[in-house]
Image: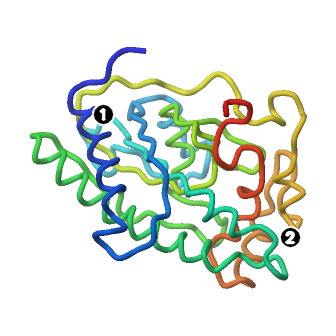
Amino acid sequence: MKEQTAIQREIVSFVEDFVARYPAENGTPALWRKPLVSFADARDPYIQNLPQLINERHMLPQDFLPSATVVISCFFPFLPEVANSNIGVEDNMPSLQWNDAYGVTNTMIGRLNEALAAFIRSRGYEAAVPEGVCMFQDILMSNWSQRHLAYAGGLGTFGINNMLITDSGCCGRLGSLVADIPAVTTGRREVENCLYKKNGSCSKCLSNCFSGALHIGNLDRQKCRTMCDRNGTDSCGKCDTNIPCAFAIPGTV
């Protein structure tokens, strides 16, 4: 693998430091392990084809920054105690710790994106935080898929739970922004991280989905949404906790 450019190394250090300092500086509990950062080629045909792959309203990096060269994706893996709190909760509800972590992490990602964009600009480049990102309620799909963008940058591969399985597992949150920095991009991974896709040996995420929304090759988005609404949350988290790929690629630790 080619060595990253100087600005890429600075960005990785900035993200790691920001996340490490965030709990003490903002009065939140420690929630995350070391973040992962990837750099996808903004002109990668895979990314340019996302409106056809995801939905026709999916946006492109150039919609936010015409000069964009990369999509910077970050994965923020939860600490084991956060994920494990979500196991065996009464009536299959998400744990309070899980719900709180989900909300705190979303806020942290927003603040990181703004700070990182400002940092990149201070180095003489342009950066943009995606604006107008939303979930279309009629199809329950986003116009900016964090998972597919991170996949394009080689951050991981998809499990049958539709989550991205990274080197630090799938239990966490993703964020991204676009920039025009010089970058060495890695491209998508060729080896599957999901045990089911490798050899059919695991489907625990499916059995964890008590709503019955998750099936091989298919997610009933409406059924999943209905269950989350019942729980008063944006994520029940059962399909990415208490599974072999929650914290690492199975077989690597």
235 or 148, nearer to the observer: 235
Quadrant the N terminus occupies:
top left
Residue 23, image quadrant: bottom left
Q: Residue at x 52, y 36 (%)?
A: 155
Q: Residue at x 55, y 37 (%)?
A: 151
Q: Secondary structure at mark 2?
A: loop
Q: Nearer the viewer, mark 1 or mark 2?
A: 2
Q: Residue at x 23, y 37 (%)?
A: 10
User: Where does the image place residue 190, in percent across and percent down from the top left?
Assistant: 64, 22
Marking on residue 211: 2
Q: Secondary structure at mark 1?
A: loop
Marking on residue 69: 1
Is 48 located above or below residue 204 in the figure? above
Type of amino acid at the residue the image marks with label 2: Ser
Extreme residue in the top direction: 2
Is 220 located above or below residue 188 in the figure? below
Type of amino acid at the residue the image marks with label 1: Thr
Is 16 located above or below residue 57 in the figure? above
User: Where does the image place residue 48, in percent across and percent down from the top left?
Assistant: 47, 36
Q: Residues within 10 Å of mark 2 (few under 14, many from 20)?
A: some
Marking on residue 200: none
